[in-house]
């Protein structure tokens, strides 16, 4: 059949088994072609071709409701629900996002991108159905990796009490992004190895009925299993063993590498473009490996994203027991960080800005109320970071700079990052967060202090008058360029690196009143709740003009970062122009 | 023996069984006496008298490390670790906090107050021990109610992988604050009923070794079980069945009521002072019951704290299936809220300010990125709320007002609260948070609009000039009193109720520039990241003076709220004086 004839799941309802197998082969082929040219989540989608076909064959979406966890594995779902051209016609590749998207289709129920949310969201759909007397099936599809997240447990635990139709399909490919971590995975292995029959069964312990499907890439088995549970009147887990990367040998063999990738060469699996640029993941990992070798109490923690922080498989082996992956469990990572620090270790948790959002209370309560000297370092905290709506990296300053006791450092270049990270690890007074000045690595070859215990002390890079520009972290070079432009217009502006986001250098800010009219703050984060607004508040009862520049309080999706910063007047020219416009 | 001779656990190491039983009776007696006069967590502590005695008899704290979940059940632990007078001598009752407190004693490892954190914190201690070659026992003591929290699952899941001494004592009294919710509790019941032998075992499924202690209030059993696991070389769960309120009949019988209580009469169990004051819990619950009766798609959600939101056992019965308690699982509550709204229901999640901190990412991702019209209403959001360090209620404005798409309403009195709550439930455009103007209920007998869809429109209560005072939520009366004082000094100030915390009324604020010199903002929350700083930022490039008044970015403990507000210049006199001082 012609893939492009599939406009909705109706078009596969009458296919016989051999046609469904052929369909799966074609889908897989198109996926490979698109992803090899375009990049995306390769392994996860190849692994669920048959499962997705079976789901749409058996269930009747959109009346029946499918919720994909993370939803990075929803490409085949999109192909079957009216968006086939986005996978078969290069000009339409970007018609779809990389995650489920209600804006595209009624078959997609939620914008999702963080992990472990599907079961909880689905409990809401199920409860709403029950209140209104509906009879549709509600199905959550969650990978084994996502089960390590506390929210998934909360969803499963509550879902069992629904007492009505609630189907949780566990897509078990025995992988997270990297290998799984957590005691649960031993149970999943036992279940896989005993055809689902072993007595100890995590899902049954939470009150679920349970079915095991050993051949999760066999269409016939899947259809039989899903048909059996369709219309069921109680909560059930359908545990499906699939193979990540199925159908493409390099992805089957190199499962971590092919979780998500840039364009690649199909015959070999090699990336088309090898990035040789320096990046902070490598810088961080090499620095930590060195520290860990010198001191066996130094620990690096990740919550399921080792490569984000540079810990490739080789580096993980090198670090040995001083590298800890807690699974996709950021709350555990932060609380453990606090316990490690209390116990005399020197722990560092490396995490992307978007994911630290999942541990606010643990940072506030477990770590900061206790003032335990754990260190967190934030990657991808930038408008130039990941640009899809569920992975934005510009909320962490607002989130973290308002927690008492937390020292939030914003280095401006590689050398300053290493200096601050080093101090953070060595000191034992404060919980410290160090924001990686993502994305481009800037080296200044300057020396930076090794001691940051004199909290909130800013650095004046250039002493001028009339206008002061405060450039936070990665935006210091931007501030510097604006200062250069002002100089061409005869204004020697003051350039400041604040270094600390968690408090103000009140002495310095007060001293600026003597000979400055205007202060402009620049931050790679939303203005609301951020650093600049604290400066505006400080100067509220004075004649100092304050311009706060940063991002707007909006969820952006697949945006062009350069366009956004221009709209926000975060270019040297516009900063200079806005500053001049304030002068009396 | 004389209780006051207990200065440390050493003093109980050589007691024989009958002496330990007598000790337990004396401890229980002193507890009852103190709590009947002083109030506190009654049932939880009565239930763990024997368990705590056994822990300190068998283990060797402080070398062996005990981490109590929530730590509201740590009174007996304090009695045995050098703080007995705080429980036997009325003048010393307040020498100790209601939770573990490192500032008091080295036997207390963490300041704790939120739920489900003990296992994760303990994994950090255990890992630190292993890295440094230590051999102490690490023991987390967690109640069955706390197991519903995702962080507890993450801790258990990771702890199983430690491969070294890690003891989790599950104190199972078959109660949360109210009854338990979640499929897990059926498994706990099966385990209790089969002497721990049933095949389906949640703890074993996560990889733990497992022991069951059926008589958790029998010292001899407890000592035997704990002695068996002392020095163990792998992770194990010791599942102990205890009776909440043990030893005091009213507490055994009325387990929800005696979870936490004010002073009471020992013979009857009746509270000494019945509060007749109106409170928002009753107002909310009565309003929701009425709404739920009229529309079977209206749902009230709690995460394990039904009485905080007024849903007493009677009201819960009345609400039937339209009242949902997800257990102590705030992430589930918020994600479910989003799913319910998507599915066509009208859900409202009532939660204390301190606990909404646990669901930031779910509010941001699950709810707000999806713009699903779920409603959250925040209780105890005030400096006048709970005043212990781990239950502070003044961070929610900073936390939530900076999330895109979220409409955060701050009503100023009972009538406005009901009006806003009603609109929030009826509309279907936005996720809405309504901040209860806690603590005292003010009724104005005024009518308020039923439509708040014109976002960010403030209300000018009094039109004046020179000075404008913006009073957020419960601080509007304060602002009004300050305005009265200014009037006596010949200044007719403008009084504004902003109503919306998530955005500014830019038209109004701009219009104030015509005839005002100063704007003062008052909020019952920390200034950093809050509402007032947005106003300061807005006026940054103008001549308007802005004073932001609110709380400092500090964790306070057992503070006097009136002293704090005075220090923060949040009194009518000081607000008026500060305003006048800004005038040219």
Image (cartoon, coloured by chain):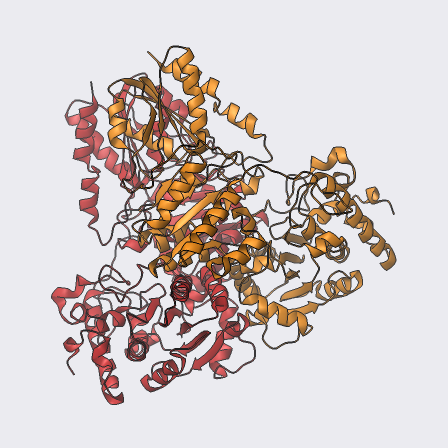
Chain colours: A red, B orange
- Quick one: B3 or A229, which is closer to the camera? A229
Relative to A28, is A431 on the left or the right? right
- Compared with B235, A419 (above or below) is above
Q: Measured from the top left, where is residue B431 in percent x and y?
A: 35, 49
Relative to A368, is B257 on the left or the right? right
Q: Measured from the top left, where is residue B182 in percent x and y?
A: 53, 64
Image quadrant in which you'd find residue B488: top left
State which quarter of the image contains the N terminus of chain A. bottom left
Relative to B293, is A272 on the left or the right? left
- Quick one: A345 or A548, which is closer to the camera? A548
- Compared with B40, A489 (above or below) is above
The residue drawn where x is 86% and y is 55% is B19
Relative to A484, is A471 on the left or the right? right
Q: Measured from the top left, where is residue B61 in percent x and y?
A: 71, 51
The residue drawn where x is 49% and y is 64% is A158
- How many marks are shown on the rendered structure? 0
Question: Is residue A418 visible in this depiction of the protein?
Answer: no
Q: Measured from the top left, where is residue A206 in percent x and y?
A: 53, 69
- Compared with A509, A199 (above or below) is below
Question: Is residue B129 visible in this depiction of the protein?
Answer: yes
The residue drawn where x is 43% and y is 44% is A433
Q: In the displayed image of the protein, which residue is found farthest to the left?
A: A91
Image quadrant in which you'd find residue A505: top left
State which quarter of the image contains the C terminus of chain A. top left
């Amino acid at each position: 059949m012609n893939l492009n004839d599939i406009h909705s799941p109706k078009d596969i309802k009458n296919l016989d088994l051999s046609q469904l197998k052929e369909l799966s082969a074609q889908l897989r082929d198109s996926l490979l072609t698109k992803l090899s040219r375009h990049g995306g989540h390769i392994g996860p989608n190849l692994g669920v071709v048959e499962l997705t076909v079976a789901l749409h064959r058996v269930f009747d979406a959109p009346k029946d409701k499918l919720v994909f966890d993370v939803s990075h594995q929803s490409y085949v779902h999109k192909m079957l629900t009216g968006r086939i051209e986005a996978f078969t016609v290069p000009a339409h590749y970007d018609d779809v996002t990389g995650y489920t998207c209600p804006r595209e289709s009624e078959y997609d129920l939620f914008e999702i991108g963080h992990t472990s949310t599907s079961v909880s969201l689905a409990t809401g759909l199920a409860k709403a159905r029950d209140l209104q007397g509906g009879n549709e099936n509600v199905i959550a599809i969650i990978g084994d990796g996502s089960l390590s997240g506390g929210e998934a447990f909360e969803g499963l635990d509550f879902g069992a009490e629904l007492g009505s139709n609630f189907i949780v399909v566990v897509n078990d490919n025995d992988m997270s992004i990297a290998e799984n971590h957590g005691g649960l995975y031993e149970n999943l292995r036992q279940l896989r190895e005993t055809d689902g029959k072993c007595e100890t069964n995590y899902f049954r312990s939470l009150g679920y009925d349970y079915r095991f499907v050993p051949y999760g890439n066999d269409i016939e088995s899947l259809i039989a299993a899903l048909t059996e549970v369709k219309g069921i009147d109680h909560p059930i887990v359908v545990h499906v063993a699939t193979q990540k990367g199925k159908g493409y040998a390099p992805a089957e063999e190199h499962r971590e590498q092919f979780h998500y990738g840039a364009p690649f060469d199909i015959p070999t699996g090699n990336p088309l473009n090898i990035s040789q640029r320096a990046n902070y993941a490598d810088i961080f990992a090499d620095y930590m490996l060195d520290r860990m070798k010198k001191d066996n109490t130094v620990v690096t923690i990740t919550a399921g994203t080792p490569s984000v922080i540079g810990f490739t498989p080789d580096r993980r082996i090198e670090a040995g027991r001083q590298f800890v992956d807690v699974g996709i469990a950021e709350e555990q990572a932060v609380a453990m960080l606090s316990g490690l620090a209390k116990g005399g270790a020197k722990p560092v948790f490396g995490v992307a800005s978007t994911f630290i959002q999942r541990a606010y209370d643990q940072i506030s309560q477990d770590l900061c109320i206790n003032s335990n000297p754990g260190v967190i370092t934030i990657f991808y905290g930038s408008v130039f970071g990941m640009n899809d709506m569920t992975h934005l990296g510009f909320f962490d300053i607002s989130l973290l700079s308002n927690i008492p006791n937390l020292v939030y450092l914003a280095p401006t270049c590689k050398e300053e990052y290493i200096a601050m990270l080093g101090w953070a690890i060595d000191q034992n007074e404060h919980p410290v967060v160090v924001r990686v000045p993502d994305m481009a690595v800037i080296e200044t070859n300057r020396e930076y202090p090794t001691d940051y215990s004199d909290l909130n002390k800013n650095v004046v890079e250039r002493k001028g008058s009339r206008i002061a520009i405060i450039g936070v972290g990665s935006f210091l070079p931007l501030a510097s360029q604006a200062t250069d432009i002002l100089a061409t217009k005869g204004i020697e502006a003051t350039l400041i690196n604040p270094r600390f986001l968690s408090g103000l250098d009140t002495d310095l800010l007060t001293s600026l009143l003597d000979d400055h009219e205007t202060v402009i703050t620049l931050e790679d984060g939303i203005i609301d709740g951020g650093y600049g607004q604290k400066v505006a508040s400080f100067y509220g009862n004075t004649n100092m003009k304050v311009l706060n520049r940063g991002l707007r309080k909006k969820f952006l999706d697949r945006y062009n970062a350069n366009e956004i910063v221009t709209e926000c007047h975060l270019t040297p020219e516009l900063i200079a122009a806005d500053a001049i416009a304030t002068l009396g």
